Image (cartoon, helix red, strand yellow):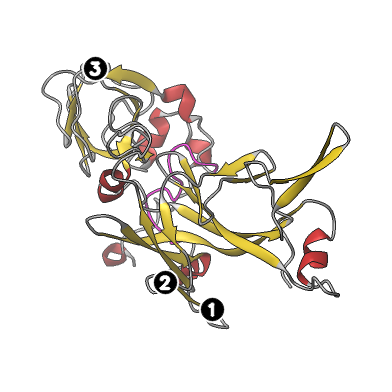
């Protein structure tokens, strides 16, 4: 048996699943889905009809409905070895809130769930599927005024124990009119890289502001706001040249307000006013939407010198070209 990732008390889950006697193996279980978006919030849902919680974290039951594994549209595929395992489930956000009548109450950030998924909010997200186990009946005993009462377990329901079933990254999001079929690949897919970790090359192998570069991104961050004329493809904002390389070309921006909050994009070019993006933002940019910009680096020695970081460059810029070698 797998080791539980959480138990109400040491050995509680083992005792529940393998107990002997007249109540042998009488339990219920529900799946917990945790999706951590690269550029957005952490989404937590459960297949239970009541909210589940433990360790200060809760998985909501009153939002997105999930068709659990084992149903016709939910599949789990695994093999022994290094083949990539997959988990597939269908997510159905609510078109309307039954209590308030509000349309599309399930959101990713500030955008309706399906619209955000269509715009790429789940691209590259990591996902975990856990299974929470409960002893039956799911009740608690309360003594009041000398009388004993049996009541339903209070919300959020606390499981006896939790097992990790699957972990990986979102690979595909197939959208329909009322739901999205999400395929999750296990982390084994990271072994599919077909090249060595380091190549001999003239350009630096470090990425600006990563651990090898050692420079701090916060030192070079510039916060500004988009002005009228900005689009999904191009942000307009009069801002001074950044420190270091002196240009935002090949840098990045991160939206901090508006419909695109949390989304980041790489900068193809910058001319002092226009930030032309490599890929468009998912939603229209309004005047006043704020964003943070960082300078770019072409990973050449001269640019590294502009940052005063020659000591940390990781490149072989002095290797002669093959056609000039003796």
Instruction: Count residues near mark 1 (Cα–Cα under 10 Å), then give few for <14, some for 14-19, many for 20+.
Output: few
Which percent across, then down, holds residue 222?
A: 36, 20
Residue linked to disc 2: 194
- Could you tell which of marks 3 and 1 lies nearer the N-terminus? 1
Q: Looking at the picture, does residue 108 appear above or below residue 222? A: below
Pick whichever of labels 2 and 1 is earlier in the sequence. 1
- What is the x, y in percent for residue 78? 51, 78
Residue that carries the numbered disc 1 in the rendered image: 82
Q: Is disc 2 surrounded by few (<14), some (14 to 19) or many (20+) residues within 10 Å?
A: few
Asked if residue 63 is positioned above or below residue 30 in the image, the reply reads: above
Does the residue at mark 2 contact the one at mark 1 (Cβ under 8 Å)? Answer: no
The residue drawn where x is 47% and y is 23% is 219
| Marked residue nearer the N-terminal end (3 or 2) | 2
Nearer the observer: mark 3 or 1; the answer is 3
Q: Quadrant of the N terminus?
A: bottom right
SS of the residue under disc 2:
loop
Query: What residue does disc 3 label?
Result: 288
């Amino acid at each position: 048996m797998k080791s539980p990732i959480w138990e109400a008390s040491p050995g509680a889950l083992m005792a529940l699943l393998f107990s002997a006697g007249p109540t042998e193996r009488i339990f219920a279980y529900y799946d917990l889905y945790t999706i951590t978006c690269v550029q957005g919030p952490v989404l937590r849902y459960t297949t239970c009809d009541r909210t589940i919680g433990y360790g200060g974290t809760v998985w909501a039951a009153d939002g997105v409905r999930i068709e659990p594994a084992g149903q016709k549209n939910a599949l789990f595929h695994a093999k022994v070895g290094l083949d990539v395992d997959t988990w597939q489930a269908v997510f159905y956000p609510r078109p309307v809130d039954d209590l308030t009548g509000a349309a599309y109450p399930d959101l990713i950030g500030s955008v309706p769930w399906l619209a955000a998924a269509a715009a790429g909010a789940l691209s590259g997200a990591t996902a975990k599927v856990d299974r929470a186990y409960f002893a039956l009946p799911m009740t608690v005993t309360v003594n009041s005024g000398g009388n004993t009462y049996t009541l339903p377990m209070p919300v959020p329901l606390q499981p006896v124990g939790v097992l990790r079933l699957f972990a990986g990254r979102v690979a595909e999001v197939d959208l329909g009119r009322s739901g999205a079929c999400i395929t999750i690949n296990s982390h084994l897919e990271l072994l599919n890289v077909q090249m060595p970790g380091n190549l001999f090359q003239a350009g630096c192998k470090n990425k600006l502001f990563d651990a090898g570069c050692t420079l701090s991104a916060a030192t070079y961050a510039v916060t500004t706001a988009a002005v009228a004329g900005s689009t999904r493809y191009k942000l307009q904002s009069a801002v001074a040249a950044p420190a270091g390389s002196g240009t935002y070309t090949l840098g990045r921006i991160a939206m901090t307000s508006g419909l695109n909050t949390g989304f980041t994009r790489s900068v193809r070019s910058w001319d002092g006013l226009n930030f032309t993006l490599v890929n468009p933002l998912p939603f229209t940019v309004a005047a006043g939407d704020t964003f943070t910009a960082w300078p770019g680096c072409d990973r050449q020695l001269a640019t590294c010198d502009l940052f005063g970081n020659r000591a940390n460059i990781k490149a072989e810029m002095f290797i002669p070209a093959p056609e000039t070698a003796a």
